[in-house]
Image (tube, rainbow, N blue to C red):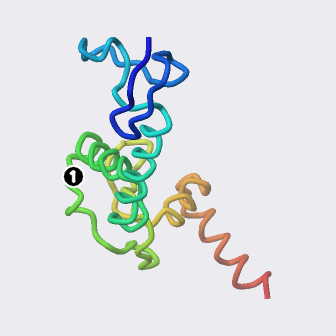
Amino acid sequence: MTRICCKCKEEKNLSTENFSRNRTNPKHKGFQAKCKPCSQADSTAYYRKCKAENDGIPPYRHKAREYSLRHAYGLKPEDVPDNCQVCGSTEKICVDHSHESGLQRGFLCNACNLTLGFAEDDPNRLRALADYLENECR
């Protein structure tokens, strides 16, 4: 049995080697209407187009971030400020929260948020690191 791809119009054997499975539409006999190379080319083109329109961020990442903000913190994307509360950076702003209480503390860039995490949220450790940088590393 063969099928003609709806995009490239080539006739190919109807098998999983040439066409992806599609069990939702009975008229397609269990296979996609597009052959695998055409389907992959369309997906790649769509991904690149969406990424270009969203400041280099893949399209699915916006949805994942919105879901995380809404369900974990009850926030909307517009509730998140543009700048880190510590250093002022505009790169990848994260919601900072206490691992003990689970409560939100503020909004930090990824670097500042990771720094807090690696310091185990210990102000004394952070002060000691600042002293070290100011005194020992000159």
**Percent of width and height locating residue 18:** 51, 24
- Residue at numbered disc 1: 75
* SS type, badge 1: loop
Q: Residue at x 37, y 59 (%)?
A: 49
**Percent of width and height locating residue 95:** 36, 56
Q: Name the amino acid, label 1.
A: Leu
25 left or right of 64? Answer: left
Location of residue 107 by image quarter: bottom left
**Percent of width and height locating residue 125:** 63, 62
Is residue 97 positioned above or below 20 on the image? below
16 left or right of 49? Answer: right
| In the foreground, 136 or 49 | 49
Is residue 90 positioned above or below 121 on the image? below
Q: Residue at x 68, y 78 (%)?
A: 131
| In the foreground, 30 or 72 | 30
| In the foreground, 8 or 90 | 8
Q: Farthest residue to the bottom: give it.
A: 138
Q: Quadrant of the C terminus?
A: bottom right
Q: How many marks?
A: 1
| In the foreground, 85 or 66 | 66
Location of residue 1 by image quarter: top left
Is residue 136 positioned above or below 25 on the image? below
Q: Residues within 10 Å of mark 1 (few under 14, many from 20)?
A: some
Q: Residue at x 79, y 81 (%)?
A: 136
Q: Residue at x 40, y 75 (%)?
A: 90
